[in-house]
Amino acid sequence: MENELFEAARGAMAKAHAPYSKFPVGAAILAEDGKIYTGANIENLSFPEGWCAETTAISHMVMAGQSKIVEVAVIAEKLALCPPCGGCRQRLAEFSGASTRIFLCDETGVKKTLSMSDLLPHSFETEVFG
Ligand SMILES: [Zn+2]
């Protein structure tokens, strides 16, 4: 499945709205339903209002009624490996388990595989809202 996710993430990257940074990013999530949900970064002239590819992909997954991430692929054409930013790590952790696999890709395929706990050890967790 990692190659399918890579291809989906690369396809999503082509849809990025990144006219300011010129740094397109794509993400693809395999959810528990077996479907792939994709996203690209979407920038805004008011810079802080833009958001990341992973966030777009999570939005698509949630709006399809899914809440469990099985695997994730991330790609940025200008980086050999593009790890999710700090905010996206916490967003991904919301819907992932410790062993959820994160594939970091370049233009040719998956180059590094991390677990969610590798990517975000000691993520924010609490029973307060449980
Ligand atoms: Zn991010």
Image (cartoon, rainbow, N blue to C red):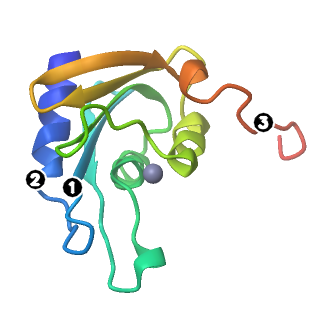
Q: Which mark is residue 105?
A: none
Between disc 3 and disc 2, whose residue precedes? 2
| Amino acid beneath label 3 | Glu
| Front disc: 3 or 1 | 1
- Does the residue at mark 1 contact the one at mark 2 (Cβ under 8 Å)? yes
| Tag 3 secondary structure | loop
Residue 122 occupies which quadrant of the picture? top right
| Tag 2 secondary structure | loop
Rendered-image quadrant of the N terminus: top left
**In the picture provided, is 11 more to the left or to the right than 25?**
left
* Residue 46 appearing in the image: yes
Residue 21 occupies which quadrant of the picture? bottom left
Q: Where is residue 12 in the image (x, y as percent from the top left)?
A: 16, 48
Q: In this view, does 74 lie above or below 64?
A: above
Residue found at x 39% / y 54%:
63
Name the foreground residue: 110 vs 65.
110
**In the picture provided, is 61 more to the left or to the right than 119?**
left
Please name the residue that numbered disc 3 is placed on.
125
Please name the residue that numbered disc 2 is placed on.
14
Residue found at x 30% / y 66%:
42
| Tag 1 secondary structure | loop
Q: Distance between the residues labelled 1 and 2?
A: 7 Å
Label 3 Cα neighbours within 10 Å, binned few <14 / some 14-19 / many ≥20 = few
